[in-house]
Structure formats: C-alpha cells, structure tokens
Amino acid sequence: MNRQSPPAEPAAGTGLPEPFAGWFAARGWRPRPHQIELLARVSAGASALLIAPTGAGKTLAGFLPSLVDLATRPKRRPGMPARGVHTLYISPLKALAVDIERNLARPVADMALPVAIETRTGDTPTHKRQRQKHAPPDILLTTPEQLALLIAAPDAGRFFADLKFVVLDELHSLVTSKRGHLLALGLARLRRLRPELRALGLSATVAEPDALRRWLVGQNPPGAMADIVTVAGGARPHITILETEDRVPWSGHSARYAVPAVYEAIRAHRTTLLFVNTRSQAELLFGALWRVNDDNLPIALHHGSLDVAQRRRVEKAMETNSLRAVVATSTLDLGIDWGDVDLVVHVGAPKGASRLAQRIGRSNHRMDEPSRAILVPANRFEVMECRAALEANYLGAQDTPPLVDGALDVLAQHVLGSACAAPFAADALYEEVRSAAPYAGLERATFDRVVDFVATGGYALKTYERYARIRRARDGRWRIAHPRVAQQYRLNVGTIVEAPMLNVRYVRAGRGVAGRGGPVLGKVEESFLEALAPGDTFLFAGKVLRLEGIRENEAFVSNAAGSDALVPAYAGGKFPLSTYLADQVRGMLADPARWTALPDQVAEWLAIQAQKSVVPARGDLLVETFPRGDRHYMVAYPFEGRLAHQTLGMLLTRRLERAGARPLGFVASDYAIAVWGLRDIGRMARTGALGLDRLFDEDMLGDDLEAWLADSWLLKRTFRACALISGLIEKRHPGQEKTGRQVTVSADLIYDVLRTHEPDHILLQATRADAATGLLDVRRLGEMLSRIRGRIVHKHLDRISPLAVPIMLEIGREPVPGDAGEALLGEAADSLIEEAMGREGAQ
Amino acid sequence: MSAERIAARRITIAGERALCDHRGALVFPEIGLLAVSDLHLEKGSSFARRRSFLPPYDTAATLDRLAAVIAAHDPAIVVSLGDSFHDGGGAARMPAVYRERLLALMAGRDWYWIAGNHDPEAPADLPGRTAAELAIGSLLFRHEPQRGAAAGEIAGHLHPGARIVRRGRSVRRACFACDGQRLIMPAFGALTGTLNVLDRAYAGLFSRDSLTAYMLGADRVYPIAGSLLAPA
C-alpha cells in the first residue's frame, strides 16, 4: 500500500470516485491501470482474477472494489439491524491476514471510511470470535479453515447475508493443495448463500491462468470463467550464477565450496535473503556462514521448525532492517513484506522456474526496480539446472503444477460440515459440490459413497448403521445424529496434517531426561528423531545438539558445541525438479553449443562424457551399464525428479529380480537413478536375456506397482493423512495423547485390516489417488515411460562414465530405501549372537 | 542359530520349556497349552459406538490368526490372557458368524478366559472357564503383571513392543518380553498398538540387563538383547 510508485502525471481524471481520487492525489500517487480495470470489471458485477508480479499493488487492487462499495453505502441509522460481513478476505497464512489488516488500516483511516476491519484466525480469542458472530466487521480477514468453520455453523446463512465480495490472496499457492479443495467447496457454499457474490483472486504469474479463472466461479455452465486482468512483469531481474574459482562438487547439496563467496556477497549488500530448499541445508549454511563471519555481521536463521517466538524475533529484526542476512526455507516464500532486501541468494538449485521467480521477487519488493539475485549451484547437475532456470526466468516461463481433481477425504469433511450447518438434500449438495471447479467431474455414485462413508464408515459390511453420524430423515434430508457430532467436526476441521512433532528442549549435558529442562528450541519430526540414539549429535536452530533422550512428546538435548554433527538426510521439504525445468536441462545437455554458457569445468565434464560414452538427445533416455568392484551397475538419466525416480527404482528392482539379475539396491537423485546387482545387467541386455524396452515398459505401472504399493510405508503415510482429514480417525489435541505414535500405529493397523478385507474402500481409493500425484509421482513416471518408448539408448561401458559420477557418489550416503525392516532385525539378532548375549535363546 | 528359520523360538521360563510363535502366541508343548493375550475382539464396533468408524473387520482378522496358531499347535488347553474383548459388551455385540467361528475353535479344548481390565466379567454366552488367575505347575497366568511377582508369571496387558535402530533406520515390532523368569505377551488383536518395553510402565518388572525382546517378524521371531533396544 505504501509502495506506490511516484507519479509521472497528476492524478486527475483517474476514473476513481472520491474520496479515493483525492487520497491518491494527496500522496502524489496515481492509481495503476490494473487497479482501475479491476475496479471497473468487478463493479460491473464480474468475478475476476488479477495476475501480477510481487510489488504491483495487488492487495490494494483487490480491496478497491469493496472499499469503493463500502464508501458509497448508505449510513446505518440507529435502530437498523446490524449489518453482516461485507467482504471476506482469505489468505493461506495467518501472518498475511495480520499484515493486510495493518496495511489496510492506513488508507481507511486517511479517508475516514466507515469501515471496520478485523482478523479471525486460529489465534483469535474465543470472546472476540463470539462478538464477531453478532457484531461482524465489514471486512473479515481469515483463513480457509476458519471459513469452513463459519459455513458449518447453523447461523451461516444469517452471518453471510450481506456478503458481496470475497478476496482470495496468493491463490496460486492455495489451489494446488487440499486446503484449496476445502476452500473451493467453501466458496461454492458462499455462492449458494449469495448468488450475486463476486470473487477476486490475486495471484502470482502461473502456467495456466484459465484453471484459476474457472476455480473462481461456479461451474454452471461447465467451463465458466472469471474475468482476467494481467499486469506485465516489472523490471527484468538481474540474476547471475555464482562464479567461483573453487571446484564445483560432483554431488551433494551443501554448497560448502561457495561459502566464502556468499559471505563476500553479504558484505557487499545491505540486506541479503538466502534461500535453501531444506531445513538441514538451512542449518548447514547458517553454521558455515558463522564460521567465516569475522565481521560478526548479524546473520539469522528462519525455518518452520524453529520455535515461534524465535521466528517472530527474526521477522521483527527484518522489518527494522537490523539484520544483514537471513537464511530461510520456504517459510518466507509468500508475499509478506520483509524490509529492504537488496539481494536474494539461492543456494542449491531452485527446482522450478516459477519458484525461483517468486523468491527473487523478495528483493527490492517494488515492481519498477530490478531484483538482484545470485544462484549458487551445489553440484554440477545443479549448475545446468540453475542455468536452465535462469534462462526460463528471463523468458517468463512458468511451471506451476497443474491442478488436480478434488480429494475425496476433503469432500467427506465438507459433507459432515454441511450437515452440521443444516440438514441437506443429497441432490442439492451434489449440484453445489460440482459447481466447485476441482469437483466438476465428480460422479454421483462416488459422491453417494462419500456420504455413506460420513454416515457409517462406508463399509460393505453394514454393521454400524445404529451408530450413524448423519442420518436420513423422513423428508429425505441428511442431518447430524447428535450435537456431539458437530463438536467432533469442529475439533477436526482442516486439511493440514502435520507429521508428529516433538518439542526439542534444552537440558544440561548428562542429565538425561530427568528433571524439567530448559527452554524449547523448536519442533522436529518424530520420524527424524527415531533414527537417532541418545548421544547422537545433530544440527538444529543453528547449534550442534546432542540427544539426551526422549520423554513423552519432548526430546531432551544438550549443547554439543565443538563436536561434529551427524547431519542426517532429511527427506521432508525437498521439492522435486519441475517437469518444465527437467526438459530445459535435457535440452541443454543435448546441445553442445549451449555448453559455452556453463562454467569451464562443467563444460569439460560434458565434453569428456561425449567422448567416453554418449550425451543423450533431448528426447532419449540414456542407460549406461558398467562393472565396478564386484558389482554391476545400471545408470539411467530420466531427469524426472527424485520422487518419480524412487518409484521407478522400486519397480525396476522388482523386475530385475524376476529377470534373474539379482539386484542389490538402488539410489535416486533428481536427475538419475543407479541400480546395482550381482549379475552383469549390460551383458544380459546385449545378449537379449533382458530387453531394456521390456524393462522400462509402461506396464510396470500395473501389477508391479500394485504389488509394491500394498506394503509401502509411503502409502501408509498417505493413508494416515486421508484418515485424519476424512474424519475416520480424530486429530490429536493437546493433552489427549502423549505422542503421535499411537495415532501412527493405529492408522497403520487400520490400513492393514482395510486393505485385506475391503481393498476397494473409498478411503483406499482416495489414498491411491493422492499417492499417484504426491509421494510416488506415478503420473510423472507414466508420462516419462511413454515419452521414452522406443528411445532408449544403451551404452555398455567397461568403467564408470563422467555423467554417472554424481549419482554413484550418492550410493551409501542414503540408506537403501525400501522396506528392509526384516533384514535389519535379522542383523540385530545376529549381532546379538555374535556378542554371545543369547542366554536361553540360542540353542 | 541365526540361519535357522524356525517360525517359533524355544525359550525357557522359570524352567518350563516354551515356544514363541511369530504370530504372537506362546506355546507350552509339554503341557499342550497355547496362550494368547489382548485379543481386543470387537474393538472396531466399540469405537463405532462413539461414532468413530474403524473397519468392522478386526474381529475377523484376529480370529483368522487365532485359527492359524491353533491349527499349527493343536493345543488341548487355550488360555486367553485377558482383554479378550475390547469392552464388556463385546461378546454380546459380536456378529453371529464370528461367534460360530470362535465356538468351532473352542470345541474340544479346555478354554480359559482370564479376566482383563477391559473385560472383567465373563464373556456373555460363551463357553469356557473364567478365572482371575490360572496356576499350572510353576506357571501363573494373569492379565496384569505384578511387581515383585514370583518366577513363572505369564502376563499381558502392556502390549509390549520393541524398537531397534540400525544404519539410520528404525524398526518397531510387537514382542514377547522375557527375562528368563517372567514373560509379558504381545497383544494378539488386529487393531492393537504397542508400548515400548523401555517405557516407565515396565519399571520394576524386568531389569534391562536381563531382558530379551523376542520381536515378531514376518515369518520368525527375532531375539534382541535389552542392551540393544532403543527407547520409544
């Protein structure tokens, strides 16, 4: 709001009514064309999507139509009933809602508009929420979860009776998740309550704006779209790839080689924002920077696992420009104002061109000045990826993920919420649900099964009828069976399923878990701590910590400064390489003319690859085989991202096993996959004992996938999320259970029982659909297999090729994936015998 | 020993020879006795009463497994060591088809229902003898393990599980917990979770140096010394 560009001309004749025209003029500002255009379209009754880069005055544009409408509204005279909410603003972040409240307050106060603005989030105290129910503000700033709660209340119709506008901020980030599905269903309800409702979506640049335009309006007729107003990109960002004399490593993600150069860049700028892709990278970089921080520059750390108070302190310090640098993960991705950042450094490859553009937008947060950014590739493949991303950003390429069909577990939650609000008729609710774009293709039979699931669990065995949560009354409408059902619903609303987390609490070294301990440093995934034993060290909150022990939901740690941290592979938060960028990297690899844009050592690496093996054409899949030590290796380069490669690895090893190649393991990166075994896979391929075309045939996504999935922990984890969102199991609340383990275990047990006895259950169906686009990335794997059909280039070598070095260096770094539990138990039992610990056991 | 793939592992408890079956049953071949603990039958329908719709197939799954161990060991005596039903109404609620299956398993055997905290009363309309405790030779079967109990106590109730950490990976399984003198049985029911044997709830029952966790594998039992176990 306070970041309007200085005017070139006076503000006269802007097409704005008073007092707005005067307000702009008094500031020497002039409204931007997109602000006027959006106002005109929305005032004419349309819903609209505004696509604009960061710093374009998006927020003010989004609120202008409702502020203008509110300013011209007749005054409420004493005795008239209180008016309901006029404008609803929904953002993905609580912090963003608070930020907007502050930013809107100024123009509203300046113009003395009779407008009350309030936030309503999970942090809003109960008394304020209750007061808001009978004396609502004109503009309510809230989150998707709060909207779900508001529409599930019996008084929803009255509460929203005066609603005219809904403003959806950061729409591009909301729509790709289950939160977006929940929000789409909420919006469909609002449209039913208020058919004249106008929706305004505010979005960064996306690959397919039409998908968002459909999302904003009811899909009756199918394919209906909101208007669109697009703001062309601002000044072209100034991006460079870090040039260094130091050797770029073959593999790894730490970018340690670049730390001195990054430090120099921080020294040369006012405030630097350093983005990394994972929490452990953030911790590593932060530690490395402080080791070379001879000037004692104020450098801070910010990631989602740190204690909230700690994060707020960093954010405050950013606002007051008292920091020189912040190392951050995706927690800072979204559009909050962060003081005067004049440089963004991206360590590690950005993994997607759109993500890079978003992050770079954080520097010089105003549209007319160029952003400055430096990319720091952590290894040689990342050099190519950074190069490709850089070219993509210059071209304005976009690779936001495509929208997926609405999830059934979210629908189940919404169906229950609908019954909590008022009895519903299945026909009417079905039509309403289908008006939401993500559910436009929902079949009636599926909808009915979801309703059945909500009522009694949806089992083929009808044993739970008498305990139903919702029942069909004589008038044919569904209503909740007991007020307690509504209570249950309110406690479990939302789609954010967090991995079970443990508090990390300080104690004095050697105290173990006795005593009360010191301050909490933050939270860490339980699954991460599982792999540690007491005495192990790890990096967290910028410190080397030693695990002293775990008690209930707390991990007790002590300071282990001076010792080496065991930095574990942290899987969460890694973005897979985007399809678009992968294609760019393949294109760059295939075209030697473009290698000149790469650093010499990388270009040389590719040239030697061309001599020793072959450099694959853009559409080909190169498969290399070679012996090394007493193993035989097969390395393939699909460039489809780690998730799809992991799935491919599981399926390939199954097939190789069947073909008698005796595979022993595999490792996957964003770029390549290596499988090793006891038999000569290359020779088998050449003699025809093993057809590579057969090996990589798309039919692996059939039975092999099913068989593997059945026992995969990935599917169990996905199932747990579906079970929580759909309400099959309840979320934990503070004090109810000691740790998340009980839920994890029982979700796994439920999964096993369900899979054995009712494999077609609607929740298993939802789980498989999630896994296909989520952790397994089956969709992308399928597209790849179809792309490379008949285009496999096999190269049998007598030794490792240059291109294979990075993936080969990953071997042994990550534990062999898969469900190796039995093997580990066997080992542990064997070592028991070695230690002659078996007393009565060994016979 | 390590290479020997036997489904059941031989142990001795207070001098009595026994087999730990990898499915979670304890067998005394010389007595012809098979013990299972914490079946928690009708747990699904118990949750359903509170409108939490767990799959209604847990009873079927548990009975399948029970039928398998009974067929494998053909015991003359079966001891169900308490919490046989998830709640007092479980036996009455059990669908007729499952009741028939259970009756068929019981036919021709001495069947003891030991009282548990979930099911202190005898299961409704089912044959078999009901007892708070059962003593056979030097063995004493009861639901809840007692601190300071004599050697030979066979109990359940705690749902013991154990965890090992190796090569950066963690494996958790249900287990028999035994120190050579006393034993706590794993929960047998399909929807039963576990409680780590190093949890405070086990304090005073075993000392960690003398404890072995017999962890249940897919086709065998893995004996792991207490010193190698990881806490929860």
Image: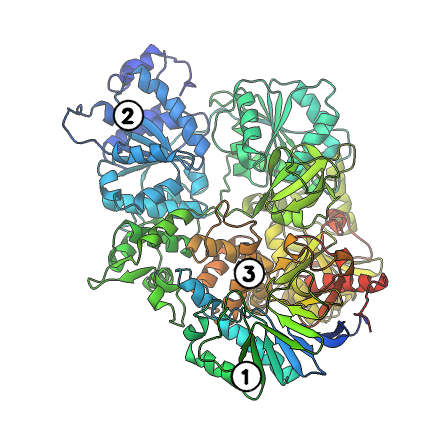
Determine the CA span between mark 1 and mark 3.
Answer: 28 Å
Is residue A535 left or right of B112 when viewed as pictured?
Answer: right
Residue at image location 58% in from the left, 59% down from the top: A785
Judge by depth and name the residue closer to the eye, A384 or A810: A810
Determine the CA span between mark 2 and mark 1.
Answer: 75 Å
| Amino acid on which the number 1 mark rests in the picture | Leu
Judging by the rendered image, the residue that carries numbered circle 1 is B105
Residue at image location 43% in from the left, 37% down from the top: A92
Disc 3 with disc 2 on a shared chain: yes
Is residue A230 left or right of A131 when viewed as pictured?
Answer: right
Tell me whether circle 1 and circle 3 mark residues in contact (CB < 8 Å).
Answer: no
Q: Is residue A158 above or below residue B216?
A: above
| Amino acid on which the number 3 mark rests in the picture | Asp
Crowdedness of circle 1 by 10 Å Cα count: few (<14), some, many (20+)?
A: some
Image coordinates of residue B118 in percent, x first then y, are 50, 65
Task: Identify the element where label 2 is drawn.
Answer: helix
The chain ID associated with circle 1 is B
